[in-house]
Image (spheres, rainbow, N blue to C red):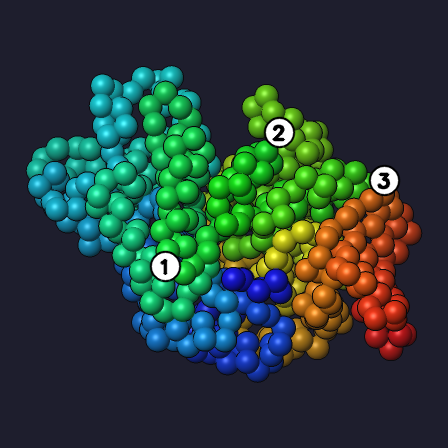
Amino acid sequence: MMKNNVQLITYADRITGQGIDALTELLNGLLKHVFSGVHLLPFYNPIDGSDAGFDPIDHSAVDERLGSWSDVKTLGQTYDVMADLIVNHVSAQSFQFQDVLAKGKASPYWDLFLTQQDVFPEGMSEADQQAIYRPRPGSCFTPMTCGDGETYDFWTTFTDNQIDINVYAPAGRDYLNDVLEKFSQNNVNIIRLDAAGYAIKKAGTNCFMLEETFDYLDQLSARANELGMETIAEIHSHFETQIDVAKRVNMVYDFALPPLVLHTLFTNNADALLKWLAIAPRNCLTVLDTHDGIGIIDAGPMGDKAGLLDAEQIDNLVETIHDKSQGQSRKATGAAASNVDLYQVNCTYYNALGADDFDYLLARAIQFFAPGVPQVYYSGLFACENDMTLLAATQVGRDINRPYLNPETITEALQTPVVKGLIELIGIRNQHPAFAGEFACRGEGASFTLSWTLDDSTISLNVDLTKRDANIVSCQQAETHTTSIADLLNPSQD
């Protein structure tokens, strides 16, 4: 079972400038006792494709520049290791798809990939195409001419370099099962089901999070469980969908939390946040930032379904992020960069809060007190600011929050008050027994309390947004201790 402690999300190379073995050394050295697990972002061959590893040429191979499966296995001897099972697609540069391009239907790998005709054998109408939900503008099909002289419309939900897998075909099932077995053999114990909501396509639907998708997630989770691994579904959608998905898999992400925390701090009103925390799944991972952008859709309305925030609140949230980041996020979001996801704002969480140290630690405290196992992204751990140089070089929006660090920059960051305060907060979350107990929240408007209770141990986060006052009150073995969030930034005042 996954430990109920804070985990790190990171690329092996971007945090250390080296590989998986260097990441293990960092966790055992400068970050010793800080994290119990690590979400090791795609380490497959290659790590520098068009989507930073999420378009694997070979999903079963470790990129040699990072190390080998032996290095992953060593990391997993000490830490929970999460890896991505990229359920929906594989790289167009993969040997399997290259064989399909060369031979067409004569390729033994033909059935691994999904075409328009597989889903719409009688042809697809304009209404059918318009009904399909896609996270980016434009068509989800890419016509390609194969060696047999025929042109086929391959399903490409994300980009034309990410060819969708036919998960119903034996070839698709075997492909994903082979990757699961490789994970199991090398101490990977948590599987993130990447882009799983798009895996099942069906004529006459929007091809996203169908009832058949739930059934498929059940089957995939059951297979992972047989191999000794837990699964977590990575799905950006309406908050009610997250609640439904949570009932069908081991864990889900609380993707509604990041925008709700920002909304709370921007407006000095916690009502929407408290409404969500009262009904949010308890079997979840919590994040504020990830390798993707800051998700917005998860808190907003979808179609005729009301959101936790209404459309005007969502617009204000996005514009406030742009203002707080001095316009930098605007340069990395939507059509301004080649990453044009409709539901994300690209910005570091630290800059989304205007690089305000107190608000940043308060945001992390709220995350750590929310139900679920917390994860902290590597750039968030070190309170990195937007990497405008990398963005200018690549013109990939998400690169604004995917910096390349090295031992020197890490050492410097560890000396800053905000990072020291964050690590102390992580220690509180990891060590207090009450976080294994019952959660409660109360309050309204600018004042609220999040609390945990286990037997005679309690811990609470008490917040007054108007006064920008927040403290943690811990009661354990008849002793009470109060920690001010402000004092975490000024330890000499303790």
Judging from the image, what secondary structure is the residue with disc 3 in?
A: loop
Vertical relation: 61 (above or below) 347: below
Which amino acid type is shown beneath numbered disc 2? Pro
Residue that badge 3 annotates: 445
Which residue corresponds to mark 2?
301
Q: Nearer the viewer, mark 2 or mark 1?
A: 1
- Quadrant assignment for the C terminus: bottom right
- Mark 1 vs mark 3: in front: 1
Q: In this picture, is 264 found above or below 130?
A: below
* Residue 231 visible in the picture: yes
Mark 2 and mark 3: Cα distance apart in space: 21 Å
Q: Residues within 10 Å of mark 1 (few under 14, many from 20)?
A: some
Q: Secondary structure at mark 2?
A: loop
Q: Secondary structure at mark 1?
A: loop
Q: Amino acid at mark 1?
A: Leu
- What residue sits 79% from the left and 51% below the top? 450
Among the 4 quarters of the image, the one containing residue 427: bottom right
**Residue 345 occupies quadrant:** top right
Q: In this image, 109 relative to 381: left or right?
A: left
Count of numbered circles on the image:
3
Q: x, y percentage for residue 173?
A: 27, 46
Distance between the alpha carbons at the discs numbered 2 and 1: 38 Å
Q: Is residue 39 above or below residue 252?
A: below
Task: Give how far apart the Cα atoms at labels 1 and 3 are.
Answer: 47 Å
Residue tagged by mark 1?
227
Q: Please tell me which residue is depicted at 54% across the width and 67% down the height of the picture.
A: 37
Instruction: Say few, some or many: other residues with alpha carbon within 10 Å of mark 2 (under 14 / 14 to 19 / 20 or more).
Output: some
Residue 347 position, x and y percent, is 60, 51
* Left/right of residue 133 with respect to residue 277 in the rendered view: left
Residue at the location (83% across, 50% down)?
449
